[in-house]
């Protein structure tokens, strides 16, 4: 039986690079898409000893025609695409009034439209056979509503809404194509270092930080598990409940603590971002931060699927109601 064929965008570094490694460990043939040819070549060389086929294609995912052409090339050279992972993204961090229109447009083009174009290209190929899995990335509840990240948050929110609308289209055609959103907490990748920084401070990831292999594990779970959505990390639970029953409380918390918890103590230095071109250098999956690792054996990061998440919210809401009622009764 031939290997399954996966396409991963943003494959040269960060989450995309970790995902390529993990899919390779399961025997997938892989097409690696990204802007930086040097990093794509490095990723291919890293996996050259495995008994899989690899195809590196330089692509700017914000160009719909390039993405479409890449998909057709994969189908021609490797075969039928069974998995497509959209892991490419771009970040600009700063007060909303500090972000010019070109910056907002570029973040939206790469993070939102790049994933939309990838989803379209994947669907066009998968519909020929009526089966496949597409994975897009979203933000965990712990990262939603962060000050200074309005454009990034908006792109991910739009992508989640896009997927919600496309799923019934797929279902109406009776295709067995899964469209999954994996909602991630802060991940230790190099991406923050080449984000556009308009804060005047050195930056660090917000909240608990996980190694990129944790994200890759969740993506792999989506590939094999037929899920609509997966939330990674126990830190999702409390923000999700608070946002559901008392959204104003979370806004107050973010207004008070959300800024400084994104600032690092290191002196601020202006560095090159990746907006005009890919930042040169031998970046791979990991960034410079201390993070919670992926454990191949033993206790892994909590993966919240839709039924488990709904059950937790309902259960905690009922518990809160009962405790409040009991307190009033004793009063």
Image (cartoon, rainbow, N blue to C red):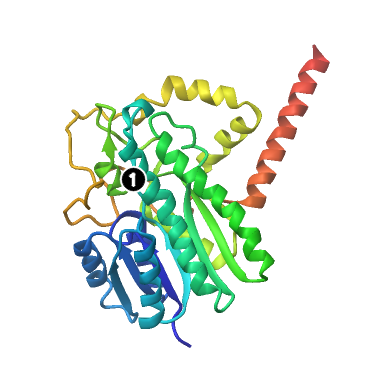
Which residue is found at the position 57% from the left and 74% from the top? Answer: 131
Q: Position of residue 85 (x, y in %)?
A: 44, 62
Q: For the residue labelled by badge 1, is the local secondary structure a helix, a strand or a loop?
A: helix
User: Quarter of the image containing the C terminus?
Assistant: top right
Residue 55 visible in the picture: yes
Identify residue for label 1: 106
Q: Nearer the viewer, residue 63 or 183?
A: 63
Q: Position of residue 45 (x, y in %)?
A: 22, 72
| Extreme residue in the top direction | 331
Residue 220 visible in the picture: no
| Extreme residue in the bottom direction | 1
Which residue is found at the position 46% from the left and 37% from the top? Answer: 143
Q: Position of residue 230 (x, y in %)?
A: 55, 53
Above or below, 318 relative to 291: above
Q: Position of residue 132 (x, y in %)?
A: 54, 71
Above or below, 276 relative to 42: above
Which residue is found at the position 24% from the left and 31% from the top? Answer: 202
């Amino acid at each position: 039986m031939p290997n399954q064929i996966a396409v991963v965008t943003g494959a040269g570094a960060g989450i995309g690079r970790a995902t390529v490694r993990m899919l390779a460990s399961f025997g997938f043939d892989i097409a690696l898409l990204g802007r930086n040819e040097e990093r794509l070549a490095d990723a291919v060389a890293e996996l050259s000893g495995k008994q899989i086929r690899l195809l590196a294609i330089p692509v700017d995912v914000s160009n719909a025609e390039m993405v479409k052409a890449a998909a057709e090339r994969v189908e021609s050279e490797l075969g039928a695409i069974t998995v497509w992972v959209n892991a490419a993204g771009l970040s600009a961090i700063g007060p909303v009034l500090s972000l010019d229109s070109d910056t907002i447009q570029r973040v939206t083009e790469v993070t939102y439209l790049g994933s939309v174009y990838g989803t379209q290209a994947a669907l066009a190929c998968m519909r020929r056979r009526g089966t496949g899995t597409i994975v897009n990335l979203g933000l965990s509840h712990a990262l939603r509503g962060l000050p200074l990240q309005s454009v990034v948050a908006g792109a991910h929110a739009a992508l989640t809404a896009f997927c919600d609308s496309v799923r019934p289209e797929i279902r109406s055609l009776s295709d067995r194509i899964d469209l999954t959103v994996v909602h991630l907490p802060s991940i230790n990748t190099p991406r923050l270092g080449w984000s556009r920084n308009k804060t005047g401070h050195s930056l660090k990831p917000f909240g608990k930080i996980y190694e990129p292999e944790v994200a890759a594990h969740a993506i792999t779970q989506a590939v094999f598990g037929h899920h609509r959505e997966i939330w990674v990390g126990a830190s999702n639970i409390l923000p999700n409940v608070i946002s559901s029953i008392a959204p104003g409380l979370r806004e107050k918390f973010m207004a008070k603590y959300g800024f400084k918890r994104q600032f690092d103590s290191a002196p601020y230095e202006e560095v090159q971002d990746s907006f005009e071109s890919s930042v040169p250098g031998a970046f791979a999956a990991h960034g410079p931060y201390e993070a919670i690792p992926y454990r191949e054996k033993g206790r892994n990061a909590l993966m919240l699927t839709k039924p488990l998440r709904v059950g937790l919210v309902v259960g905690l809401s009922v518990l809160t109601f009962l405790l409040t009622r009991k307190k009033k009764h004793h009063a």
